[in-house]
Amino acid sequence: MYSLIIVLVILASLLMVGIVLIQESKGGGLASSFASSNQIMGVRKTTDFLEKATWGLAIAMVVLSIVSAAFVTKTTVEEAPINITAPAQSTDAENVPTFPAAGTQNSAE
């Protein structure tokens, strides 16, 4: 169900991108290329449809995003019990490796 909701959100977002690009902006936008067809359909009707489609898709995206939160798979991590009885490792002060002093060299002569 979660995958279906995600696919619907992606589809709505792609449709939203297309509709926003078609809408008439201050510079004319892509809608200016449909000027000849505006005489048949009417300018106001296409503007109303694009505006309603934009609002509808925006509301659909918000609702689907909220609904998708309900269908997110919840994974539980089983915590491993802490082993309290394990002895802590400590260093033995008497068992420290010794290194030759600086300046003395062991030669095999």
Image (cartoon, helix red, strand yellow):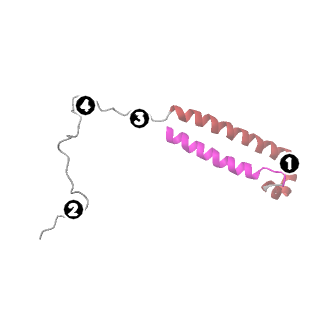
Q: What residue type is labelled 1?
A: Val
For image coordinates 63% across by 44% down, the residue present is: 12
Classify 10 Å Cα crowding around label 1: few (below 14), some (14-19), many (20 and above).
some
Left or right placement of residue 23 versus residue 60 in this view: right
Which residue is disc 1 drawn over? 43
Q: Position of residue 49 (x, y in %)?
A: 77, 43
53 relative to 67, above or below: below
- Report if the CB atoms under discs 3 and 2 are less than 8 Å apart: no
- Report if the CB atoms under discs 2 and 1 are less than 8 Å apart: no
Which residue is disc 3 drawn over? 75
Q: Out of 26 and 1, give the one closest to the viewer.
A: 26
* Residue 10 magenta: yes
For image coordinates 70% across by 51% down, the residue present is: 18
Q: Which of marks 4 and 1 is nearer the N terminus?
A: 1
Tally of numbered discs: 4
Q: Which of marks 2 and 1 is nearer the N terminus?
A: 1
In three-dimensional space, the C-alpha distance between marks 4 and 1, rounded to whole angstroms, equals: 75 Å
Nearer the observer: mark 3 or 1; the answer is 3
Q: Give the main secondary structure of the magenta stretch.
A: helix
The stretch in magenta equals: 1-27
Which residue is disc 2 drawn over? 104
Q: Which of marks 4 and 3 is nearer the N terminus?
A: 3
Quarter of the image containing the C terminus?
Answer: bottom left
Q: Where is residue 39 in the image (x, y as percent from the top left)?
A: 88, 52
Q: Which of marks 3 and 2 is nearer the N terminus?
A: 3
Which residue is disc 4 drawn over? 83
Question: Picture quarter containing residue 88?
Answer: top left
Left or right placement of residue 11 versus residue 79 in this view: right
Q: Which of marks 3 and 1 is nearer the N terminus?
A: 1
Q: What residue type is labelled 4?
A: Asn
Classify 10 Å Cα crowding around label 4: few (below 14), some (14-19), many (20 and above).
few
